[in-house]
Image: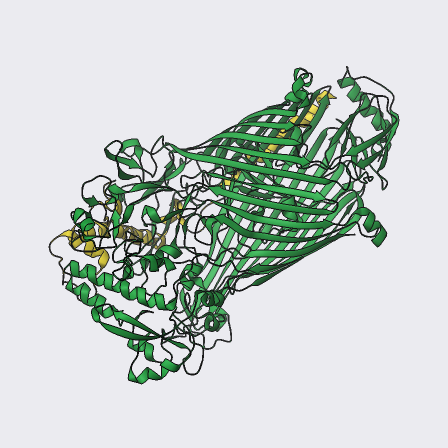
Chain colours: A yellow, B green
Amino acid sequence: MKTYKLTIAFVGCLVASSGLFSCKEQLQEVIPQTSLNQSLVLSDANAALTLYTGVYSSFRTYHSTLFTLGEMRSDIWADGLFTESEDTGLKQYWSHNISATNVPIDNWGGSTT
Amino acid sequence: MSLRSIYPNKYRRYVLHIVCWLVAFSAWAQPTPLSGTVRDARTNETLPGVNITIKGTTRGTVTNQDGQFTLPVRKGDIIVVSLISMSTQEVVIDNHTALDIKLAESAKSLDEVVVVGYGQQSRKTLTGSVSTIDQTVFKSVPRTNVGTALQGTAPGLRVQQTTGQPGSTPTIVFRGGTDFNGSGSPLVVLDGVIVPSLFGINMEDVESIDLLKDAASAAIYGARASNGVILVTTKKGKKGRTSVTYSYKRANNYIRRNPLQYMSAEDYIVWNRRGLASRFAAAQADNNTAEMNNARNQLTGAWGWGVNSGWTAPDGKYSTQLVSNSNRNLLTDPQYHLLLDKNPFNASQTDSLLYRSISQRQLEDLILQQGTLNEHYLNVSGGNDQGNFSLGVGSISDVGTLIGSSLSRMNMNFNGGLNVGKNLVVNLNISGYSAKTTPSYLSADGGGGVGGGIVQRFTGIAPTVRLTNDLTGAELPGVDGSTLGNPTYFRDKFYNQTLEQRYSGGLNLEYTILPGLKALASASGFYRYTTNDSFTKAYINGTGGALVNTRNASFTNQRASQYTYNAFLQYTKDVGKHTVSALAGGEFFESRVYDYGATANLAATDFIPWLSASTAAVGVPTSSFSSWQRLASVIGRFNYTFANTYLLNINMRYDGTSKLITNQYGFFPGVSLGWNMHYADFFANSFLRRYVSTLKPRISFGENGSINPLNSAGQPLIGDYATIPQYGSVGTYNGQPGFAAGITNTNLKWERANTLNFGLDVGLLNNRVTVIADYFIRNVYDKITSLTIPAWTGYNAYVTNLGQLQNRGIELEIRANVLKPSSANGVSWTVSANVFHVKNFAKKLPNNGLDLNRQGAVQIFDPGQNKLVWVGGLQEGKRVGLDEIYAPIYDGIYTSQAQLDERANLWNSYLPYTNKRIKLLGDARWRDTDKNDTLDYRDNVYVGRTTPTIQGGFSSNLSWKGFNLYGQFDYSLGFIIANQSYLRGMSQVQGSQNGPIDVTNTWSPENPTGTLPRYYWANYGRNYFTDAGGSTTPPANFWQKGDYLAMREVTLSYDMPAKLLERVARNRVKSLRVFLTGSNLVYFTGYNGTFPEVGGNDVGRFPLPRTATLGATISL
């Protein structure tokens, strides 16, 4: 009788664990649905072009930060250069309104982390 | 059901033989028939449908209609007598042949059955920390969301209602949260199915709610349980007579008035002109001619108090105007009032002003209304030896107190169990709901942002507003298009509704392989469809505004599906004093979400409120497979009990997730130990036994996971594919779609939380007083953290496992039967109270080269140490300070030139002036903590925390004959709130906004006895907000204590006594209960706003209504 029970328990565990192994495959089936993966991105010209464009797009933020922290703070910008209403955000740079209490760009735009 | 009917004779012998063989020392005796009657201890009535089982066996029976039973027993057997809502009794059989058993009603004592996830357990043998919600709160209050029943009833949970929108799910945080920002809400399991939230569950269908708190108990839910687990169980049929229960509730939602009183139109005009004069005076002192001219011009500006040229027209936006020859006739117009006021810029000139006025109450009445709620619920249930069933059907419709807000919902819930043959039990659950929610068109209430808050915005409308044409009385659209517009004009302009349907079902099989060994399997899942449709009719964008006829139309449609399959083997065995039970199995879980949506506009007419009538698309319509997750798990539980005294429980779960790649699997174990000391001989024989009837120390340690932590905005920090290298859309560049590789951490791990929980259950004086106490230390480590990385890498953040958070806290629950009834008609009084306290600590933070690896900390001057110190934010080893508020403080106001001269050098960095040393009479006399003549961040002082430190609730239940008076309260202590309704009015940041009457108590040359800082138009003097726009920067003086005690429920009910029912209804009516309930009645608080429980930053949102309900429940 004891053996019988042990067998049942053993078979049960086996069933459970085999279930788990098949589950492993199930888990790997879950792949991104709204983005490209490594094997697809260079597989055809159109996909590769998105990558090319994407690189340019990604560079934008950083160069915008460089611009605001560099050129925007130089003396080529001054009051009156704006024909329409001035950008109050950017004004803080060229007017050098930067202090411990007035931080126009958090963490130096991430450039010095 | 006798033993003979369960097993054929031969088989029974066989079983007994095996039992005998295994349990060599168990005595053998011939079974003798035992008969008995079970009665209610209080009423002495017989109880049908009571389960009688012989402990450790599957043998048993149920009492018949007359409460009688017969069962073959042997000497030494223990029979267990149990009935839901009654205390379970055990009787040891000596030489009995007849028994008279009396069951007492279980007053939420230590005898209750607790749902523990994949099973249930008696609280007697429970070793973990599990709270069971008092079912009294389920009975009377009409609840459009089950979450509100948890307020003040579950120690460990912070439950906040943040809007009066019917049906909305409260914010729930468990034991301080597992995220640094203090968020983290429990996993919700409804009848074994993990559901996204408590939305849509019908309170009437709920039988019980349990909360798994310590990690050892929650370990059975493994990787998703680090914030505890709420287990909701719906009603099942009980053996015995079939019953039909109908209940009806009708409630009125009464407007909760803003306790803050606003200025009259007259004061509003006068004080804004004074505020403008103050602004002018400051600009003059600053030698700022441009600003002086600007201030001067504002007198005729487009403000509610300004004498704008447009306001003289009978349909101008506001009504304020100077008396002139052309409007002299208005002096006799009853709509108009005359005001003589000194010109702010020319002391010798008095202006004669005409204005129409609308009171705060009238404005409130335009957007707030008394709503009604109707709820019907019908339940048919029953059961016999073959099976049981319970079918609940309900409908609820609730009209909120903010115009346009409503919820209507229909619910269905079916639980059926069928005994197929002798060994197979099939249980089926089918449930569904369909809910329609309409928000108010007044979109200002949106996310509850600082600029939002509908009550703050709308009741702050200038009291000089013109909502009808002076001459014709025709309606005008009001101040603007959607947030401040005239509700009588706009109420039908915005069509917006959300429909949500969820259909769920579960099939559970229970097969008895051998006595004590069972195979369990279940499959469950749900589909949820959420559709939002919106359409905007053509409207005039505020009085005098343009006609907006773009007729925007949009829809979103979300389809979510979820499946779970699991299978277990369960083994239970009693060997002498040893009881062992074990459960092992596996589970597979999948969830998918698909989203669809589109926006279009330019429909020709208002008559077709659907996107199909539009002629142009706005943006790109979307359809996406937006979320996909799978989880595969192995689950195990082991319980061992020795003589009911020494208790051991082990839960474990091994989870694999599709969200992770390298570290896909995680093992989450939990061990708990308990000791029923009151059963131990030394204790049972000691004198203590007379007073202490239960004493059970518990200890548990376990580990849970979290794969879905939230960022500070409440959004999931990582997506479904965060560990899979991929190329995602980065927007378009030069008209071309751009995809780029994200930065991926394939080595991301589960975030883990381990909890060490010490608990103590005490029952005093025969369990008349029960105490459940818990102390816990939860460490959340390997925290999934978004780490800022240098921008030159091309990325902003890298997600990794860093940091450790610790929550430490205590929870205490006390229940007492203060008065026990001596007879059926006696007085009984039960009280209960709970309290919890939790503190969060930042134990470890990502190394960033700063002292204590601080993040978001600020520097203030500490006069004690005479130096600058870092405070707040996150600092390694310190208490989490993200909810700490530091602000400048002032000590009174400048009332004399001498005081001004004394502080002439103080430089106020917050001022918008060129010369920041300017200060006028009546300005706040800021405290220069560091004595450096500069007021800046260094002078901030600690104000308090926005998160309560102590929370809890208490209740009282008094019964006499059939009458019952129940009251339930909850409280939060130790937190502060900024009341934006008050502050935005006092600072006049917006320009036209009306302010509280405290404005008339500010200092001004005309009011030199004023005690509050000077009122400046458009926050020029920065006395009430230190920044221009005003957000959470009021001075320390204006942060208020939020401490409140809420009278959440008071119910008076009457249960018709059985004898009366018998006489009147001739046994056809089983029970009849009528009740009168008040819910969310009152907050006892010193806070001057409407909604103290929102805490922190009260932007003046749509408040909870006060609700009065009349209801009846009848059972046939």
Can you see residue B563? yes
Q: How many marks?
A: 0
B355, B207: nearer the viewer: B355
Tell me the residue at 85%/39% (across/down): B64
Quadrant containing the N terminus of chain B is top right
Q: Position of residue B198 (x, y in %)?
A: 56, 48
Instruction: Residue lying at the far left in this picture: please name it.
Output: A75
On screen, residue B1042 above or below B702: below
Horizontal side of B634 relative to B841 (left or right) equals: right
Q: Position of residue B614 (x, y in %)?
A: 45, 72
Horizontal side of B136 relative to B786 (left or right) equals: right
Can you see residue B196? no
Q: Position of residue B421 (x, y in %)?
A: 80, 39
On screen, residue B328 above or below B223: below
Q: Position of residue B38 (x, y in %)?
A: 82, 35
Horizontal side of B359 relative to B1036 (left or right) equals: right
Tell me the residue at 58%/56% (across/down): B1107
On screen, residue B1032 above or below B860: below
In the rendered image, which quarter is residue B99 located in?
top right
B302, B732: nearer the viewer: B302
B841, B825: nearer the viewer: B825
B174, B218: nearer the viewer: B174
Instruction: Residue lying at the far front in this picture: please name it.
Output: B1009
